[in-house]
Image (cartoon, rainbow, N blue to C red):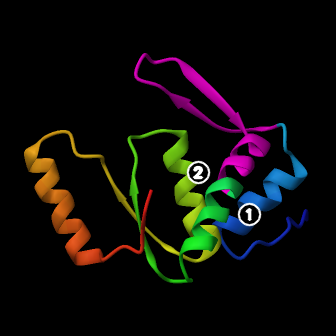
């Protein structure tokens, strides 16, 4: 029987994959023009580390962070950074109209985020 390395959670599995197979494709994202964007584990880890550093400088463990991103690689990196640093990720779409602004205001009032990205 083959034993795989045991990881306790998603961030530790992601880091293990990035260390062991940095050039392997971690994800493929289709942009608004249906063009595929491949991202390796190493590239994604660099993005995650950049966001993680900002989060660590500005917040404490367990604090909520509002993620205002359209779907894409930047959202994924920010979400993984929240998980990796022990912060609570609160994803929300950037507001595009008045009703979306009202919805965002409600999210902010109820979640009281320490940081908005």
Residue 107 relative to residue 18: left or right? left
Residue occupying image coordinates x 81% and y 51%: 18
The residue under label 1 is 13
Pick the quarter of the image with the C terminus.
bottom left
Residue 85 relative to residue 112: left or right? right
- For label 1, the crowd category at 10 Å Cα-Cα, with few meaning under 14, some 14 to 19 and many 20 or more, is some
> In this view of the protein, which residue sits in the foreground, 108 or 15?
108
- CB under 8 Å between discs 1 and 2: no
The picture quadrant where one finds residue 22 is top right
Residue occupying image coordinates x 55% and y 40%: 73
Task: Give residue 77's position: percent from left, percent from top.
Answer: 59, 51
Residue occupying image coordinates x 21% and y 58%: 104
Residue 74 relative to residue 56: left or right? left
User: The magenta stretch spans which residues?
Assistant: 24-48
Tag in front: 1 or 2: 2
Badge 2 marks a residue whose secondary structure is helix
Q: Earlier in the sequence, mark 1 or mark 2?
A: 1
The vertical placement of 27 against 13, above or below, is above
From mark 1 to mark 2, how far is it between C-alphas?
15 Å
Badge 1 marks a residue whose secondary structure is helix
The residue under label 2 is 77
The tally of labels here is 2
Residue 100 relative to residue 40: left or right? left
Pick the quarter of the image with the N terminus.
bottom right
Residue occupying image coordinates x 40% and y 22%: 32
Task: Give residue 67's position: percent from left, percent from top.
Answer: 41, 57
Task: Give residue 46's position: percent from left, percent from top.
Answer: 74, 48
User: Which label number is shown at residue 72?
Assistant: none
Task: Give residue 54's position: percent from left, percent from top.
Answer: 61, 63
The picture quadrant where one finds residue 23 is top right
């Amino acid at each position: 029987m083959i034993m795989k390395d045991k990881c306790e959670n998603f961030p530790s599995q992601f880091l293990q994959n990035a260390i062991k197979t940095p050039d392997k494709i971690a994800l493929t994202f289709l942009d608004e023009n249906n063009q595929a964007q491949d991202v390796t584990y190493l590239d994604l880890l660099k993005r995650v580390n950049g966001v993680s550093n900002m989060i660590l400088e500005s917040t404490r463990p367990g604090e909520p962070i509002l993620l205002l991103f359209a779907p894409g690689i930047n959202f994924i990196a920010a979400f993984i950074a929240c998980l990796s640093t022990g912060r609570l990720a609160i994803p929300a779409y950037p507001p595009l109209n008045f009703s979306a602004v009202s919805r965002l205001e409600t999210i902010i009032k109820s979640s009281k985020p320490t940081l908005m990205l």
